[in-house]
Structure formats: C-alpha cells, structure tokens
Amino acid sequence: MSAACAISKLKEKGHFIVGCDIYPGEWHHETKLCDVFIQAPFATKEDVYCQFLVDTCKKHNLQYIIPLTDLEIDVINRNRSYFKDTGIHLCMQSADVLVLARDKYALYNFFKDDPFVPSIRTFKFSNLPETIDFHCVAKPFNGRSSEGLLLDATREQLNAIKNKDVYIIQEMIDGEVFTVDYCRSSKFGTDVAIPRQELLRTKNGAGTSVEITPDDSLIELTRHIGSKLNINGCVNMEFVENNGKYYLIDINPRFSAGVAFSVLCGYDMINSHMACMEGKEIQGQIKLTKQIIIKKYIEVIQ
C-alpha cells in the first residue's frame, strides 16, 4: 500500500525505478509508475529470491534496494551475505534494530524497565501465569498485518496454540490506536515524527481514515524510542492510548501503509529515508496541523 507514494516521490528526485512483484505487472497500477517492471519469484524461496535481486540490480545498474514488506525485510536480513561487496545498498534497518523490531517479545523486554516507555505486559507460554487475571491478546512474536491475531483470547484458544512457540500473550489494553511515521538520521541525530490517530482501519491494520495528531508527548516518546534503538531511516510505530498513556504495540521497520498521509502533511518521508541511507542530513520536525485525511480508491483500466 506504500508503493505508489514511494515510487512517485523517488521519481520526483530523478531516480530510475525498477519495480518487482510476485504477480504480473498488468495486475497493478503502480507498474505504470516504474521505468521497468519485473515479475519476481516468491521471497519464501530465499536463495532464488536474493539471487534474483542481485542479478536485477547488476542488469540495470541499480544501487539501492527498498523493501516495502516485512516478509521481504526478514528474508533479506537473513541473507545479507548475498549483497556483500556488490555495491548494492539495502535501504532498511540494521540487523541489530531488526532483532528487536521484528520480535515483539524482545522489544517488550528491551523497554519493560524504561520509565519513559509504557509497556504492555507480555509473556511466552513458558512464563505465563497459571491464573490469568487479565484479558489477553495472542499473536505471533514476528507477526505482520494482524495475521494469527487472537483478540480477547479464551483459555480454550490459548490451550489450542500453547505448543506453537511462535505465539506471545499480551495483556489487552483498551483504547484508541495511534501510529507514528518516524524518520531519524543516526549520523546527525536529526529526527521527525508525524503522529496520527487511526479512525478507520482495515482488518489487517492499515488506516484508511486518520486524524493528524500534533501531540508533543507522543512525539517525544517516539523520539526517545528511536534514539534508544538507534533507528536510521523511516519506520512506523504503533501505540494504543489508555488514560493519557501511549503504550507501545509494535514497530514496523518499513514505510507504513499510510505513509502518504505524512507526505500530504508536508514531510517527504520517502526521500528523507533515502538521505539517511546515504549519510545525508534530513529536514527536522515540521509544524503539524490537526486535520482528518482519508484514503480513496478509484478504478482504472490498465
């Protein structure tokens, strides 16, 4: 969902874009925005997929790979050796950051004793209390787009998945969902946060109607988290607000599905991300206005 925004902003800066997807190009409007489109193999075939990326970059003299989904990021992160000494820059978070951003249990443990970061109690089945005195959520520790999510899970549901090591259990916190598009230069320490409340969102967690929320406390919280993790480039953080506190839910180490909302506010998250990858300075925090932005869909003939 971030593809059209990412491609358009990169094209504005004169970049040559080769787009890849596992489906035929004529199935996507975004392919018309690219200079070249190539149908890609499944990322789950890791060796084939990574070799495809290297070969494509060499063929078209490409310098940068910008993965847009968690699955791609996980695969490329596990196979960084493919890209070593090729001159190809992986425009994504470092392996150290991804260890935490792609593991919700590790992320919880990293911040659970931080007095500035409200954290949601999180367990594995190995340390889950026998008597649970709270409503809970069960989900894969490295899940994406709400896949495998069990809201207000019953004891019977928990028993059915207790042998699946991939699951974590969290206390269920009621409240409104806020997400923050965040970009930080690890070289210069400059950062920017664009918070929004998700008014309407799809079942897999993509906001379709949002309200830009210039909340200084949420901006400072996001900056603190970004500094502690040494984020470099653009990520998206998710929070749930309860009684005036913003509880950290997740960090998505990529452009969010709604990154275009931040661009509409006047901040170019896409090219700021590229500047971070190139070791260049980025624009700092902009003045935000409270406003509602909606995503619309139109039909086009390909």
Image: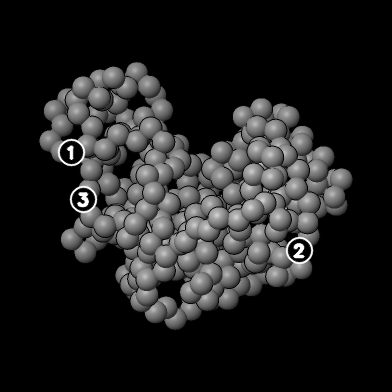
What number is the disc on residue 15?
2
For marks 1 and 2, the one nearer the N-term is: 2
Query: Farthest front residue?
Result: 301
Amino acid type assigned to the residue bearing label 3 in the image:
Asp
Give coordinates of residue 74: x percent, y percent: 57, 38
* 132 to 230, vertically: above or below: above
Q: CA distance from mark 1 to mark 2?
A: 49 Å
Q: Which residue is mark 1?
A: 135
Q: Are marks 1 and 2 in contact (CB under 8 Å)?
A: no
- Residue at the location (76% across, 63% down)? 15
Amino acid type assigned to the residue bearing label 1 in the image:
His
* 81 to 112, vertically: above or below: above
Task: Say whether residue 300 is left or right of residue 259.
Answer: right
Give coordinates of residue 204: x percent, y percent: 41, 44
Q: Are marks 3 and 2 in contact (CB under 8 Å)?
A: no
Give coordinates of residue 205: x percent, y percent: 40, 48
Task: Say whether residue 226 is left or right of residue 149.
Answer: right
What number is the disc on residue 233?
none
For marks 3 and 1, the one nearer the N-term is: 1
Q: Residues within 10 Å of mark 2 (few under 14, many from 20)?
A: some
Q: Which one is nearer the viewer's eye here, 205 or 81?
A: 205
- Residue at the location (35% across, 49% down)? 249
Q: Residues within 10 Å of mark 3 (few under 14, many from 20)?
A: few
- Residue at the location (29% across, 26% down)? 125
For marks 3 and 2, the one nearer the N-term is: 2
Q: Which residue is mark 3?
A: 174
- Residue at the location (66% across, 64% down)? 8
Q: Which one is nearer the viewer's eye here, 4 or 154?
A: 4
* Residue 255 visible at all: no
Amino acid type assigned to the residue bearing label 2 in the image:
His
